[in-house]
Image (tube, grey):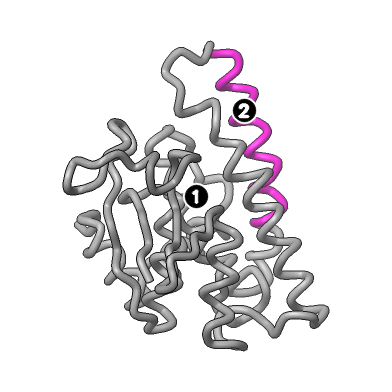
Amino acid sequence: MKLYLTPGACSQAPHIAALELGLPVEAVKVDLAKHTLPDGSDFYKVNPKGYVPLLVLDDGTSISEANVILQYLADQKPGTLAPAFGTLARWKLMELLGFIATEVHKGFGVLWNPATPAEVRAAAIDRLGTRFDLLAGTLAKQSYLTGEAFSIADAYLFVLLNWTKIHKIDLARWPALTAFQARVAARPAVQATLKAEGLSK
């Protein structure tokens, strides 16, 4: 399998999952500014959507969207980073992934555009804050989003929380989130991912 990624982007979540699961995944770095691959070729020819992550299976089948790729990877070793498909626990995990993808991940969208007006940025950060309130409430009571076991939802949230540093969003009012960040960052697979992406200190 090949995982097309950009260091620090949402593609880092499936990268973490692959290393947590010990799956043989070849990481291919994409320059999203130029939409090119390491050999200079056009990334759009690999993924017409033009963004990461993209997982290409050994038979050439492509899977896109972070929350879907995360589930595909987890299901290669059932019960490790996600409950078995069809169980209520899995539906609850999918609910979390949907929330993270649509309410948190997409909530950062306008913040990446330097032309976004200050009042729009402030409103987006306020909306993210209400999402952080909900997540912090859960993480104040347990180590991870689904309980005491690390899951693909935690990998996804960890990556997005790291974006708060880029956008100067202070997480001090959510100590449960900062504790979660530290807990996930300490995991060996996460450390290995950060090193592989050139992001370790």
Report helix, strand or loop for mark 2: helix
- Amino acid type at image mark 1: Leu
Across and down, in percent, residue 4 comes to: 36, 56
- Residue 46 against residue 60 in the figure, above or below: above
Residue at 69% x, 48% y is: 133
| Sooner in the amino-acid sequence: mark 1 or mark 2 | 2
Report helix, strand or loop for mark 1: helix
Q: Read off the residue under disc 2.
A: 124
**Residue 94 in the figure: left or right of residue 188:** right
Q: Which residues are magenta?
A: 118-135
Res 51 quadrant in image: top left
Q: Quadrant of the C terminus?
A: bottom left
Res 140 quadrant in image: bottom right
The answer to if 197 sits in the magenta stretch is: no
Q: Residue furthest right?
A: 88
**Residue 127 in the figure: left or right of residue 111:** right
Across and down, in percent, residue 60 comes to: 43, 65
Residue at 38% x, 37% y is: 166
- Amino acid type at image mark 2: Ala
- Estimate how packed mark 2 is, as few (under 14), some (14 to 19) or many (20 or more) residues with alpha carbons within 10 Å: some
Q: Read off the residue under disc 1.
A: 160
